Image (cartoon, helix red, strand yellow):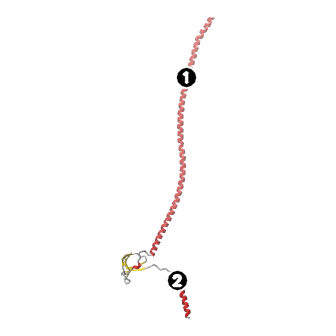
Amino acid sequence: MKTRLFIISCLLLSSFSFSVQAKTQYVSDHLVITVRTGQSAQFQIIKTLETGAHVEVLEIAETGYTRVKTADGVEGWVRTQYLADEPVAKEKLERALSQLAKTRDTLKKLKDSYANLSKEHQELSKVQSTLSTDKKQLDSELARLNEIAKKPIILDKQNRELQQKNVTLEKDLQRLNQENYSLKDRSQREWFIAGALVLFGGIVLGLIIPKLRRRKTSSW
C-alpha cells in the first residue's frame, strides 16, 4: 500500500514539475522604491518612485543610500542600487514607441506630400501639354502672320517698281510727244515750203508761158 502511494506521489510530482517547466514566464521590470528621510529602512517613507522616474542626485553616501531630489521637489534617501545612469528598458521602449509614432507621422506626412506633389505634377504635366499645344498653334499663327506681313513689303516693292516704270513711261511719252510735235512742225514747214515753191513755180510759169507764146506768134 505504501509502495503504491509512493508511486502515485512520484507521478503527481513529475506531472507538476513537467507543467512548471513547460510554462514560460518573464521577470517584471516594474519596480517601486521608497524615498525615506534617512539612510536606512528605519526612517519614515515620504514618497514612492516607480520605474523610470527621474531624480536629481544630491549626495552619495557609503551606506548604500543616495540623497535625491524628485521632479516635484521632494528630497530624501533611496537605495543606490536602484538608481542607474541610463534610462530603464520601459522608458527606452516608451521613447522608442514615441519616436516610432513620430516617424510614422512624418512618414504619413511625407506620403501625403508625395501624393500632393504627384497630383500637382500631373496637373503641371497637363498644363505643360496644353501650353505646348498652344505654343504650336501660336507658332503656326505667327508664321502665317509673317507670310501675310511679307506681302505688303512685296506689294510695296512692286508698287515702287511700277511707279518707277510709270515715271519712265511718262518721260518716254513726253519725249514721243515732243518728237511728234517736232515732226508735225517739220511736216507743216515742208508743206508750206512745197506750197510756196509750187506757187512760185506757177507764177514763174505764168510769166514765162505768155512770152513763149508771143515768140511763137511773131515767128509765124
Quick check: 39 left or right of 145? left
| Callout 1 amino acid | Arg
Instruction: Relative to 204, say whether 55 is above or below.
Output: below
The vertical placement of 178 against 9, above or below, is: above
Q: Residue at x 53, y 53 (%)?
A: 132
Please tell me how crowded label 1 is: few (under 14), some (14-19), or many (20+) other residues with Cα within 10 Å: few
Q: Residue at x 53, y 43 (%)?
A: 150
Q: Residue furthest front?
A: 62
Task: For label 2, count other residues whose C-alpha is less than 10 Å away and answer few (under 14), some (14-19) or many (20+).
Answer: few
Residue 181 appears in which quarter of the rendering? top right
Three-letter code, disc 2 = Gln
The image position of residue 199, as x and y in percent, is 57, 16
Tell me the quadrant of the picture where the N terminus can be found. bottom right
**Marks 1 and 2, how far apart at CA:** 156 Å
Judge depth for marks 1 and 2 and give the one in front: 2
Identify the residue at image location x=54%, y=25%. 182
At horizontal 61% and vertical 7% (from top left) the residue drawn is 215
Instruction: Tell me the element at label 2.
Output: helix
**Earlier-in-chain disc, 1 versus 2:** 2
> How many marks on residues?
2
Above or below residue 50? Residue 192 is above
Q: Which residue is mark 2?
A: 21
Position above or below: 203 against 218: below
Q: Position of residue 152 (x, y in %)?
A: 53, 42
Q: Which residue is mark 1?
A: 186
Image quadrant assignment for residue 200: top right
On screen, residue 95 versus residue 216, left or right, reads left
